[in-house]
Amino acid sequence: MEEEQNEFRRWDQLPPDVLGLIFINLSLQELLTVIPPVCKSWSKAVRGSYCWQDIDLFQWSIRWKPHQLDRMLRMLVTRSSGCLCSLHVAGLKNDSIFSFITENAGSLQVLHCQEV
């Protein structure tokens, strides 16, 4: 019976990339607030670029002020470590955030930006 249990890894022992594959199915709020305090390995996984390849901030961005959106975008684009492929957002108000995105999201293929 003990040998059988050793065949399975505990959640906190999974490699960060595997956890990242699981975590990409969670909401932005869960990725930022629920997952990091669970344990060190989960926090490390959610800080990795894998969870930030496709960022959908649309619902969040229509409720927040431009300076809050700017800060959030800078944080998430930085977390993506150049691996951001798709970004869906609303209400971008200044050229500096567009410049930041183009300079730091070399893999960006889709930018869906709507006005609010």
Image (tube, helix red, strand yellow):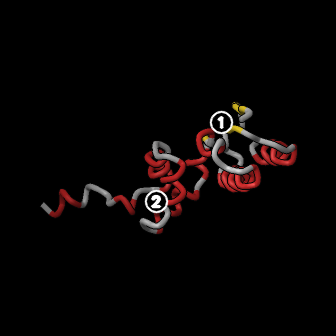
Question: Is residue 54 in view from this perspective?
Answer: no
**x, y percent for residue 78:** 71, 54
Question: Vertical placement of 66 versus 116: above or below?
Answer: below
Residue type (three-letter) at the residue carrying disc 2: Val
Residue topped by disc 2: 34
Q: From the image, which quarter does the C terminus lie in?
A: top right
**x, y percent for residue 23:** 46, 48
Is the residue marked by circle 2 packed among few (<14), some (14-19), or many (20+) residues within 10 Å? few
The residue at 39%/62% (across/down) is: 13
Residue topped by disc 1: 88
The residue at 87%/43% (across/down) is: 95
Among the 4 quarters of the image, the one containing residue 14: bottom left
Q: Element under label 2? A: helix
Residue 87 in the figure: left or right of residue 2: right
The residue at 28%/55% (across/down) is: 8
Question: Is residue 53 in view from this perspective?
Answer: yes
Question: Vertical placement of 94 versus 47: above or below?
Answer: above
Alpha carbon distance from label 1 to label 2: 22 Å
**x, y percent for residue 41:** 46, 64
Q: Element under label 1? A: strand
Residue 54 in the figure: left or right of residue 25: right
Residue 100 in the figure: left or right of residue 86: right
Give the camera-side residue of 58 and 25: 58
Q: Which mark is residue 25?
A: none
Is the residue marked by circle 1 packed among few (<14), some (14-19), or many (20+) residues within 10 Å? some
